Amino acid sequence: MMNKDKKQVYKKIINGEVIKIIDQQTVKIEVERKAPHPKYGKIIKSNRKYLVNTEGKEVKVGDKVTAEECNPVSKKKAFKLVS
């Protein structure tokens, strides 16, 4: 029998490019987002950088990666590497 008070948790998934290898378990990725301006309709690019836990997986600068939200590993790391 399932509990009805449990809610399904959706984890945020981001796709980006590795821009810096910080240490053995941490990389910095940059995620580019494109969205139209609400009034004028021009496509606007915005970038955001995230720290990602690699868990021993091998990555290089310039690789395209996918990261998934997880419980915070440290103060600024809340994503883990998927592929």
Image (cartoon, grey):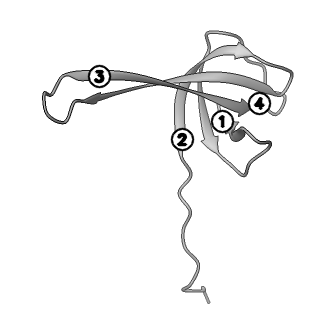
Work out how far the residue at label 3 is from the one at label 4, CA to CA, in angstroms.
30 Å
Report the mark closest to the observer, 3 or 1. 3
The residue where tag 1 is placed is 82
Q: Residue 60: x percent and y percent?
A: 71, 11
Residue drawn at point x = 72 percent, y = 38 percent: 76
Work out how far the residue at label 3 is from the one at label 1, CA to CA, in angstroms.
28 Å
Which quadrant of the structure image shows residue 58? top right
Q: Amino acid at mark 1?
A: Val
The residue where tag 2 is placed is 13
The residue where tag 3 is placed is 44
Which quadrant of the structure image shows residue 28? top right
Q: Is residue 2 above or below residue 66?
A: below
The residue where tag 4 is placed is 54
Pointer 1 with pointer 2, Cβ within 8 A: yes
Q: Secondary structure at mark 2?
A: strand
Q: In the rendered image, which quarter contains the N terminus?
A: bottom right
Pointer 2 with pointer 3, Cβ within 8 A: no
Q: Amino acid at mark 2?
A: Ile
Q: Secondary structure at mark 4?
A: loop
Q: Amino acid at mark 3?
A: Ile
